[in-house]
């Protein structure tokens, strides 16, 4: 008789027993051209401990783009951007001295490496990761890996997540990488325009894949970002659900900024708009 195939386990992080609450955010898309969004993050980071969780989990796309950790240390070709990245990093690092900050990659900042994690005081997580909090398991992800219908993106993702592609990209001069990143964004904007602004046409998290992940993780709730469509979706299967985080855009009308807090009572959304 053949032995059963071992179950491929997801990474697990267990919250210390003294954590009362944890906060989740994603898709801030921090960028120099929108300092208001960084201000909203900074005001959360400076808020009294009674208004914050015991840990902050950033589920990807913290930054609008990340082309290599050297943007923090070398003389970047665009000096204003370099100052902005360093301001973001020092705000997070100061916060991390008293509150742990965890980060998993989004599709915009997938190149964020160990040096930038250290500069931001963040602990890297694999995507997905199971968080065990007060005895229950919660599955955390950026969510892009589950948007299976977006086949162009899935192909792109498979390519850029290989160590070979990343090494080759990072070996290029900063100015070259900036040019490539600009071209990629122009192409992605053009694709979005061709789909139109009807969000219902954009790829969403695949329900079957989400259920499969939850079963494999032995969890009921998937918490993710990426789609910028905050909602709670029941997935059947005895109470499975996915909870989608909001993106942040303080320049939008109305402005958007929200965190999801998990405590002994469950999940709640807390607006962080001024
Ligand atoms: Mn994303």
Image: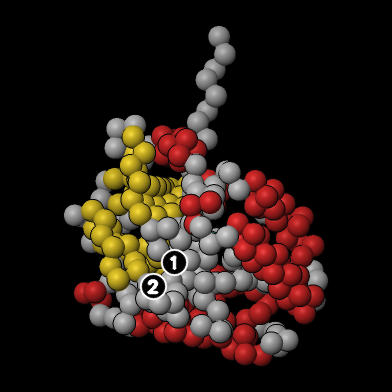
Q: Quadrant of the N terminus?
A: top right
Q: Name the side, left or right, on which 244 lies relative to 173.
A: left
Disc marking residue 107:
none
Q: Residue at x 62, y 90 (%)?
A: 80
- The one of 108 and 235 positioned closer to us in this rendering: 235
Q: Residue at x 74, y 70 (%)?
A: 183
Tell me where residue 230 sits by quadrant: bottom left
- The one of 233 and 71 positioned closer to us in this rendering: 233
Give the residue pinned by disc 2: 256
Query: Above or below — where is 83 with respect to 169?
Result: below
Q: Specify few, some or many for label 1: CA neighbours under 10 Å numbering under 14, 14-19, or 20 or more.
A: many
Q: Does residue 107 show up? A: no
Q: Name the side, left or right, on which 84 lies relative to 49.
A: right
Mark 2 vs 1, N-terminal side: 1
Q: Residue at x 35, y 54 (%)?
A: 231
Percent of width and height locating residue 44: 34, 78
Give the residue pinned by disc 1: 247
Q: Residue at x 33, y 50 (%)?
A: 232
Q: Is mark 2 within 8 Å of ligand 1?
A: no
Q: How is the image coloured?
A: secondary structure
Percent of width and height locating residue 228: 46, 61
Label 1 residue SS? loop
Q: Name the side, left or right, on which 155 lies relative to 216.
A: right
Q: Does residue 140 show up? A: yes
Q: Quadrant of the C terminus?
A: bottom left
Label 2 residue SS? loop
Percent of width and height locating residue 126: 52, 53
Q: Is mark 1 within 8 Å of ligand 1?
A: no
Query: Above or below — where is 165 with respect to 178?
Result: above
Q: Are marks 2 and 1 in contact (CB under 8 Å)?
A: yes
């Amino acid at each position: 008789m053949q032995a059963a195939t071992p179950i491929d386990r997801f990474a697990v992080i267990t919250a210390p027993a003294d954590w009362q609450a944890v906060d989740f955010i994603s898709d801030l898309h921090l960028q120099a051209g929108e300092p208001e969004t960084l201000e909203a993050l900074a005001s959360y980071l400076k808020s009294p401990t009674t208004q914050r969780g015991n840990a902050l989990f950033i589920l990807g796309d913290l930054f609008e783009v990340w082309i290599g950790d050297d943007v923090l240390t070398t003389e970047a070709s665009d000096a204003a951007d370099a100052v902005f990245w360093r301001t973001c990093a020092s705000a997070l690092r100061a916060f991390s001295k008293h509150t742990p900050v965890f980060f998993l990659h989004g599709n915009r900042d997938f190149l964020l490496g160990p040096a930038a994690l250290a500069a931001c005081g963040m602990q890297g997580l694999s995507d997905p990761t199971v968080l065990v909090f007060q005895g229950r398991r919660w599955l955390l992800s950026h969510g892009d890996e589950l948007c299976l219908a977006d086949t162009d993106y899935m192909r792109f993702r498979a390519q850029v997540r290989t160590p070979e592609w990343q090494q080759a990209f990072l070996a290029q001069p900063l100015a070259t990488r900036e040019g490539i990143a600009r071209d990629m964004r122009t192409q992605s904007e053009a694709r979005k325009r061709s789909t139109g602004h009807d969000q219902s046409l954009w790829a969403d998290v695949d329900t079957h894949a989400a259920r499969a992940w939850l079963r494999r993780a032995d969890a009921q709730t998937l918490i993710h970002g990426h789609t910028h469509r905050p909602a709670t979706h029941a997935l059947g299967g005895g109470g499975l659900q996915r909870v989608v985080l909001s993106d942040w855009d303080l320049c939008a009308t109305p402005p958007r900024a929200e965190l999801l807090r998990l405590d002994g009572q469950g999940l709640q959304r807390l607006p962080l708009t001024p």
